[in-house]
Image (cartoon, grey):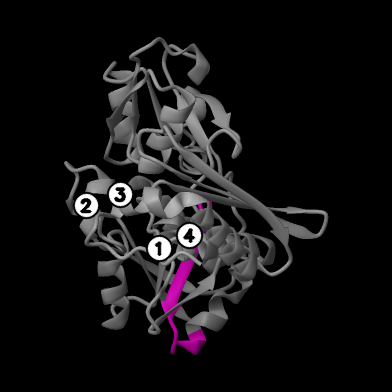
Amino acid sequence: MAHLRIGSRGSQLALWQANYIADRLHGHGHTVHIEVIKTTGDKIIDVALAKVGTKGMFTKEIEEAMLDSRIDLAVHSLKDLPTELTPEFVIAAVPEREDPRDAFLSNKYSRIEELPARARVGTSSLRRQAQLHAMRGDLEIIPLRGNVDTRLRKLQSGEFDGIILAAAGVSRLGLTDLVRMRLEPEQMCPAAGQGALAIEARSTDSATIAALKFLDHTVTRAAVECERAALNALGGGCQVPIGAYASHENGKLTLQAVVASPDGTEIIRAQRSGSEPQELGREVGEALLANGAMRILASVYGTAASVPQQP
């Protein structure tokens, strides 16, 4: 059995995730140490994520620690992991997924539909902002950064009438008291990989990869690979207004995806079914581009950014 060093961000949720994996590794006879690593995304807390524009902003420093052999593996929220890893790294395992949906939390209102005009809703995500605007163009969407506890404190202090968080994170921390509704993917398409964890390792570290194999959940991996392939076809990172959600139905994968303008005035959707995850993801991404998603993404990325060519 091995001694495994896990790299993790220092937030309460990140540490819950790292400890969850540590417990499962302990159950297989391994000894485990968790190393807390501060990332770029943790250091920049007063700017909306969409304006930072750094792919890998929650993973770069952790990967550097792996390359330096200070840690053996990293536990990430999969939606924070860039769609293309450098050759030095591999996703060694994707455990079974938690709830992939977004959740609406509020002290006063039981549904988004009940919010009054100009109600203040907090979210850190351009994807959520865009789809909220499409649902309710009369809401005031306010950038909300910080860990889950910080966001809940701001809600409870009256700064917001409601906030949107990933249902999985709220559930993992046992903080579901203020959850008023969970938004179905047809209402608010989740981020690619939302609710899933990714266990990253060095691609040359065959011993660690073998030790992690039991954590891999085949059904979840197929779904998130499909979602990430769509995101990759669109040239997207985790902070762009793209949603992608794959589900297993009748022995096949069904992928639905959206690209939305930040103000919610335009939403482009595509849905396909298939059996090969990456091929299906690319097909849906290309369908979105063919239907005009490039125009929206170009305005979000800026003229200096790289936007994929329309097929």
> Which residue in the protein does label 4 denote?
231
User: Residue 283: percent from the left, percent from the top?
Assistant: 60, 64
Residue 199 among those drawn in magenta: yes
Mark earlier in primary sequence (1, 2): 2
> Which residue in the protein does label 1 denote?
235
* Amino acid at dot 4: Leu
- Judged by depth in the image, the label closer to the viewer, 3 or 4, is 3
Q: Please give the name of the residue rendered at 69% of the width and 70% of the height, measured from the top-left corner.
A: 276
The secondary structure type at the circle numbered 3 is helix
* Amino acid at dot 2: Val
> Which residue in the protein does label 2 denote?
52
Q: In this view, does 224 lie above or below 105?
A: below
Mark earlier in primary sequence (3, 4): 4
Q: Which of 204 and 142 is in front in this view?
A: 142
User: Residue 199: percent from the left, percent from the top?
Assistant: 48, 68
Label 2, residues with CA under 10 Å away: few <14, some 14-19, many ≥20: few
User: Residue 118: percent from the left, percent from the top?
Assistant: 33, 14
Snapshot quadrant of residue 262: top left
* Amino acid at dot 1: Gly
Q: Please give the name of the residue rendered at 41% of the width and 15% of the height, measured from the top-left corner.
A: 107
In screen coordinates, is 80 left or right of 268? left
Which stretch did the figure color magenta?
194-207
In screen coordinates, is 261 left or right of 226? left
Mark earlier in primary sequence (4, 2): 2
Distance (Cα) linking label 1 and label 2:
16 Å
